[in-house]
Image (cartoon, rainbow, N blue to C red):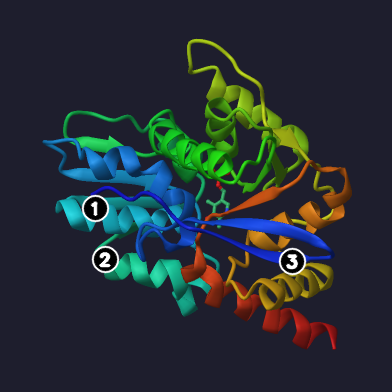
Amino acid sequence: MQLLNSPVNSFEYAGTTIYVKRDDLLHPEFSGNKARKLAYFLEKPPTGIATLISYGGTQSNLMYSLSALAKLNHWQFRYYTKTLSRQAAKSRNGNLAASLNNGMELIELNSDYDRVTSALISTPHQLVIHQGGAQIEAEYGLQQLAQEIILWAQQNNFANPAIFVASGTGATALFLQKHLPFDVYTTNCVGSPDYLRQQFNELMSKSPKPWQLPLILANNDYRFATPNATLYRTINRIIETSQIEFDWVYDPVGWQILIDNLAQLPQPILYLHCGGLLGNATMQARYQYFFRQHN
Ligand SMILES: *Cc1c(COP(=O)(O)O)cnc(C)c1O
C-alpha cells in the first residue's frame, strides 16, 4: 500500500496565512506522520513475519496504526505497556479500544517494563517497532513527505517556508529536516527541550553522518497530555478559524508554541497535521473532567 500526496489547505490567523499539510487525510487507519513512519513497512511488508511487537502508552496513535498494519498482513500483534491506570482499564476507548478490536494482544508489565522492552530485537519471524516508531526505517516515508513539501514550495514560489511540526519522539522533525532545504521548527510536547535534543542526537547517531538538527522552540509550560485552560482556548480558536479538526494531545501545544513565536518565524508557515484524531475522545473526556474540577 502506498500513501502519498496529501493536500495543503490554508487559513488566516492574526493577519498571517498559515498552510496546513493534511497528512491526517492520508488514510483512516494510517494517518498523519504514522503513515509516513510506517510507509517502509506498508509498501514493502517483510515476508516471514509471524509477530509484530511494539510498546508504549495505550493511547498511542502509533499503536493503533500498528494494529492495523498487523491485521493487514495477518501478523499477530503484541504490545507491551505499563500497568493501566484504573481509569484506562475501565474505559478502554479511543486508540486502545480500536487496537484491541484489531486483535492486539496487550501485555501489562510493571517493574519489568524497561528490562523487557529494552531487550526486544527483530528476528526473521518477529518485527520490533520501537516506541513511537522512532527508528531508522521511519526515514523512508519522511523523505517522501519532504519531496511533497519541496514540490509544494516550488509550485507556489515559496523560497523559504518555515515548516512546523509538534514533536514526541522527534523522529518526524529530524528526518524531515534531513531531506528539506528549509528550516524545520518544532517543540517538545513530551519532556524538556533537552530531552528532545537528546532524542535527536540518539536517532541521528544511527546514520553514517550528521545533519542540521530541527530548531526547537522551547515548551517550558505545558506537560504532555495534560489539560490546560490556555491550551484549550488556543486549540478551539485554531479549529474554529481553520475549520480543520486537530489532535488534542500534541496539537494544542504545537499551536500554542507556534503562535507564541509567530512573529519570529520566516513566512509562509506550513504546519504539518500529524493525524491522531481517533485519540481525541479520550483527551476530550480528560478536559471535561478537568473543567468539572476547576469550575
Ligand atoms: C505521533 C504524533 C506526533 C509526534 O511525532 P514524533 O515523530 O514522535 O515526534 C505529533 N503529532 C501527532 C498528532 C502524533 O500522533
Does the residue at mark 2 contact the one at mark 1 (Cβ under 8 Å)? yes
Q: Is mark 3 within 8 Å of ligand 1?
A: no
Query: What's the residue type where badge 3 is placed?
Result: Glu
* Camera-nearest label, 1 or 3: 3
Apparent side of residue 87 relative to residue 271 in the rendered image (left or right): left
Q: Which mark is residue 70?
A: 1
Residue 59 in the image, given as x and y percentages of width and height: 50, 62
Apparent side of residue 29 relative to residue 203 in the rendered image (left or right): left
Q: Residues within 10 Å of mark 1 (few under 14, many from 20)?
A: many
Query: What's the residue type where badge 2 is placed?
Result: Asn
**Mark 1 vs mark 3, CA separation in Å:** 40 Å
Q: Residues within 10 Å of mark 3 (few under 14, many from 20)?
A: few
Under tag 3, what secondary structure?
strand
Q: Foreground residue, 85 or 2?
A: 2
Closer to the N terminus: mark 1 or mark 3? 3
Closer to the N terminus: mark 3 or mark 2? 3
Q: Residue at x 53, y 11 (%)?
A: 209
Does the residue at mark 3 contact the one at mark 2 (Cβ under 8 Å)? no
Q: Residue at x 27, y 37 (%)?
A: 127
Under tag 2, what secondary structure?
loop
Q: Which residue is mark 2?
A: 102
Q: In the rendered view, would you say 281 is above or below 249?
A: below
Closer to the N terminus: mark 2 or mark 1? 1
Apparent side of residue 167 relative to residue 295 in the rendered image (left or right): left
Q: Which residue is mark 3?
A: 12
Residue 60 in the image, given as x and y percentages of width and height: 49, 57
